[in-house]
Image (spheres, rainbow, N blue to C red):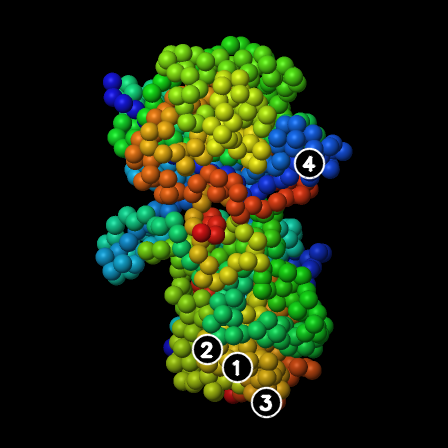
Amino acid sequence: MKIRSPRYHRETPQRYRLEAAKTKSGDVYFPPRVYYPGGQTAEPFKMSDTGTVLTFTVIHTPPPEYSDLAPYALGIVELDGGGRITTQIVDVDPAEVKIGMRVKVEFRKIRTEGSEGLLCYGYKVVPE
Amino acid sequence: MREVAVVGVGMHKWGELWETSIRDMFVMAARNAMNDAGVDNIDSMYIGCMSGGLFAAQEHLASMLADYLGVLPAAAARVETACASAGLAVRMGWMEVASGISDIVLVGGVEKMTDITGDEATFALSTAADTEYEGYSGVTFPGLYAMMANAHMAKYGTTLEQLSQVSVKNHANGALNPEAQYPFPVSLETVMNSTKVAEPLRLLHCSPITDGAAAVILCPVELAKTKFKDHPLVVITGSGHATDTIALHSRADFTTIKAAEVAAKKAYAMAGVGPADIDFAEVHDCFTIAEIMVTEAIGFFEPGQGGPACERGETARDGSKPINTSGGLKSKGHPVGATGAAQIIEITRQLRGEAGKRQLKNPRRGLAQNMGGSGGSSLVHILEVR
Amino acid sequence: MPDVGIVGYGAKIPRYRIKAESIALTWGADAENYKKGLQLKEKSVPALDQDTITLAVEAAKYALKRAGIDGSKIGAAYVGSESHPYAVKPTGTILSEAIGATPECHTADFEFACKAGSEAMYVVYAQVKAELIEYGLGIGADTSQGAPGDALEYSASAGAAAYVFGTKDIIAKVDYTYAFMTDTPDFWRREHEHYPQHAGRFTGEPAYFKHTLGAANGIMKKAGMTADDFDFAVFHQPNGKFPMAAGKRLGFPREKVETGWLVPWLGNTYSGASPLGLSAVLDVAKPGNRILMVSFGSGAGSDAFIFTVTDRILEVQDKAPKTRKQLDENKIYLDYGRYAKFRGKILRNS
């Protein structure tokens, strides 16, 4: 399904710059929310660009827009200083990906909407 | 609050039903349920359907299905909580009967998944995850459960053999279910060597793409005792429903399904029973790791013991806790919006003694656990025969 | 007017490579012709999820890291490339958004074949010099394409280099700039065409050498300097042979050119070529070193800069990945089949 402009545009602070929010108690919310549990207040927080793989998989049957990339490693990464992302782990042989692996965030093209639509960018991680 | 009975159940042979539309599938299942109960009309109905829009390009399903079922102008609503939609429909119908608002309520679900390509179905299913923060990364549902599997394997030493044994067991059960999509046994070797989908999960660790519908007729127990005496009386004694974060990455622990644990606790409390009192269960084995994690979450086994328990045969039909005697989602099929109702059907048939070749010996109490997404929602129902 | 110079620099080279042998094998060519004759051993290939924008963003982030400033301080960001991913929609807006420079930022996409990167640096330098902005980013980035089987296929590669210019904390002061340009039809690509056309041997003497030597001689004359006054020289490098020949003709000993001579292992990164060469020089430069940089873009023209390295260089060299390290380490080799897939050279149903 195509990602239309308004939706893509709305998410760019998160996709491009990992903008999150941090509550007084130190919890990181990505993306920022309108309301935080317990009515806490939160400040804008830019997540770090390094982190650790908490768990992962290697996708062999991807959604249509991602088919050229398969097989690709994909994991949940805990960023240093708080916040988690689900993201592809690239520039690595998927067989070498491990839980606990150190990674860093890179700006990458996430998907292409055919030859005429939007080019959609965002974060992926590579071995640190 | 009135006690609620299950007085009619119906489905049809599930599979890739190229010649059957979403409306026809639903009517086949619903009329089977109405015939089973012996009713010609209903007061209202709740239909679970995950995505009529993406799978079949049809919204406003409730009215269409009420029309084709011939029950106009009965109240009808479609409900949705991803793959737990039919479980939610059961709960909504149960609430309506328990509250005294209606007497005869049809609950069920339907999903027509093969009118679109496999790729498109993969995408439609992925919308049950957080589209912006999970789906955008290129994750799929097998991928989410694969990440849970890797975490579970790392934490507890769960093995690929154990993940595979779940599939072997469920196919052995499904082979005895004439309504199952894939009613044949599979060997451990076949499962372990099947095509890679999302490592460590392979094709035969995953439930299939299925067209299917299922329906159940509910009424107050007092009414069932007087008007519906053809079958043993099956009563819903517990209903639990809970949610969790839609995104897997937002959860503190990837190795447990918190929503299933909370929903089960609520259902146990309502029924006044505990895991030890349950004779058998239908659980949401969309991927074999899910069955292992859910049997732990609902208290049948200690955390990390779901895999070994299956390997020891404890969850087989002749084990201490038979799981998924119907074949589960794996063998019976998984038309996502209908699955939760089919689980209630299997529990009811077992309790009634109508489960044919896969019949357990005199079960008294069964549990059905239905799950939405990667565990963002879960419904648990406990049924007893009286 | 204040002294202006580079305050931060960054390079980004994709990890994928293809060897000349793999290309030659596919087209029945003799790899030795390219390896010995043109000094092209292998080249970088962008991953499927890398393009001019993503490479430019990573290079820019490294440049900001070395500069020690936040993206919001950037008052102008110019990206030079002949492979801007959109025909219409700026590379610069996406880049500026990604580094946090929006909304108070001027941006433009430049195109001048292989010269667009130095052009971006040239204009940013002028903006800072004119005190219109405090900091600006000039970037050369490309994921260039040569037609399958064409000589250019052995060289057209991918990479980016980014330069933050400013007046404070300079690591390499700009001493002189000079531009040299004529209308010379040596190489072009028409709209909607996938691959460029070139004029064969006409691209040498009347194009590359005339402009490169013209700009180099022009800036040295302006500065009153000769090759002896420089520690390093960086020239545009469409192949391994041309920059070495240019250096020799200008009187530079081979070792002064070699540090920034990346092309035998990197290929021609087009707009990124001389900027990447400069980054490799800055990685090892010492305070007081003087550097000549001359770009070349078909069409045709050259920009020339003379830089003097400051003491601060030693503080920033290790703050981001070095160019040679990216070039020499962690390479992933592709066969021609995967390379063709990565570069969209395979006919497919849409």
For mark 4, give the secondary structure: helix
Left or right, B42 with respect to B179, comes to left
Residue type beneath disc 1: Gly
Q: Chain of mark 3?
A: B
Q: Quadrant of residue A22?
A: bottom left
Residue that mark 4 sits on: C23
Mark with earlier residue (3, 2): 2
Residue type beneath disc 2: Pro
Residue type beneath disc 3: Asn
Tags 4 and 3 both on a single chain: no
For mark 3, give the secondary structure: loop
Q: CA distance from mark 2 to mark 1?
A: 21 Å
Pick whichever, B286 or B73, lies toward us: B286
Is there any visible trace of residue C78 in the rendered image? Answer: no
Pick whichever, A70 or B2, lies toward us: A70
Residue that mark 1 sits on: B366
Pick whichever, B10 or B31, lies toward us: B10
Position of B230 relative to B63 (above/below): below
Residue B18 point in image, percent of width and height:
71, 56
Tell me the crowding category of disc 1: few under 14, some 14 to 19, or many 20 or more residues within 10 angstroms, Cα based.
many
